[in-house]
Amino acid sequence: MSAEARTGTYTAPELDDAFEQELQQMALEVAAPPLEEPREPGLGRYAKFQFKDFAMYRGSALLAMALVGLWIFHYNYDPNWVADAQAAGRQLDMTEAEFFRNIVTGAMALLGGLGSLVATFGIVARDREGGHQKFLFAKPVKITRFYLQAFAINGVGLLLTALLVLLMTSLAFLRPVPIVAPLTIVATLYAAVGGLMFMLSTLVRFDLALALLLGLLSFPLREAARHGKWWAVATAWLLPPLDKLSAFVDRPRHGGGPTPFAAVSSLVAYGAAYVAIGVAALKKRSIMR
């Protein structure tokens, strides 16, 4: 019997150096945090879908309405009207080119207003009503960023539609058309009217009807405020000053009115405020209903 057995002691054999290093490596691997799973692509994966949705539904509807309007305009417009009116003794303070420019600008303002309503109709409310939000946000995506991206993409789509209509107008009449002023009006209207629609879509169901009503109401309400009606003065500031867009048409002939810069800055400020309220509503209210 060995001495270790007689004394009741036992000495463990020394570990092999290679085996000891392997154990240390295994310990480090266990202690190390697990590797992060590859992140899902961000909002960019929705951008293509959002632009395609605008082109197929909203943009195509706007383009169809614009083509009908262009056909009516081209069929009824007489470039000799101004000369005939002057020959008949009527005093006109514009040339035929200015007359044509004003018609194109006014038509693009109409397209900008209606287009803003179409481009932002149900931008939030439609997903909530159809239950689409359960699929859209099944993966971790910030709701506010998703709808702000949709708002921006629809705005770009509306501007591209307006530019296409202007190019078709130039081709139909075989003459140059204004580009900067009409596109500025469309972008400004989208900021104000589209921003109002965005806010309403986060709060109520019938956003289109309410936005159309409020947009039309802003004209008589501000006119009443200018005449000192107290109820109009107290409420007119809530609605965008759409009447200021007349600066793009009346500026060459009248003085003292709002300048185009003042009109654009005022309406864009209103639009930014509406969008900010809409974003705050998205953060406070649950869309998963």
Image (tube, grey):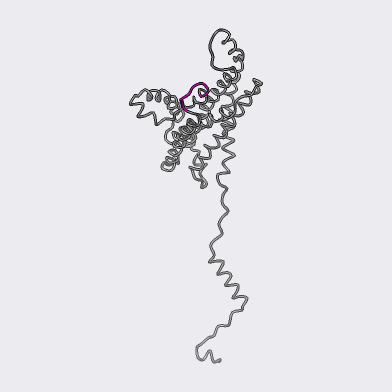
Magenta stretch, main secondary structure, is loop
Q: Position of residue 149 (x, y in %)?
A: 53, 40
Quadrant showing the C terminus: top left
Q: Position of residue 193 (x, y in %)?
A: 48, 30
Please state the total of marks drawn on the protein image.
0
> Which span is picked out in magenta?
251-258
Say which residue appears at 51% left-offset and 47% top-offset. Answer: 140
Which residue is outermost to the left? 230
* Quarter holding residue 179: top right
> Viewer-proximal residue, 279 or 159?
159
Q: Out of 113 and 117, give the one closest to the viewer.
A: 113
In which quadrant of the rendered image does the N terminus lie?
A: bottom right
Q: Is residue 132 above or below residue 85?
A: below
Q: Position of residue 267 (x, y in %)?
A: 47, 32
Residue 163 magenta: no
**Residue 243 percent coordinates (x, y):** 46, 25
**Residue toward you, 65 or 16:** 65
Residue 202's place in the image compared with 16, above or below, is above
Q: Quadrant of residue 88?
A: top right
Foreground pick, 46 / 148 = 148
Q: Residue furthest top?
A: 88
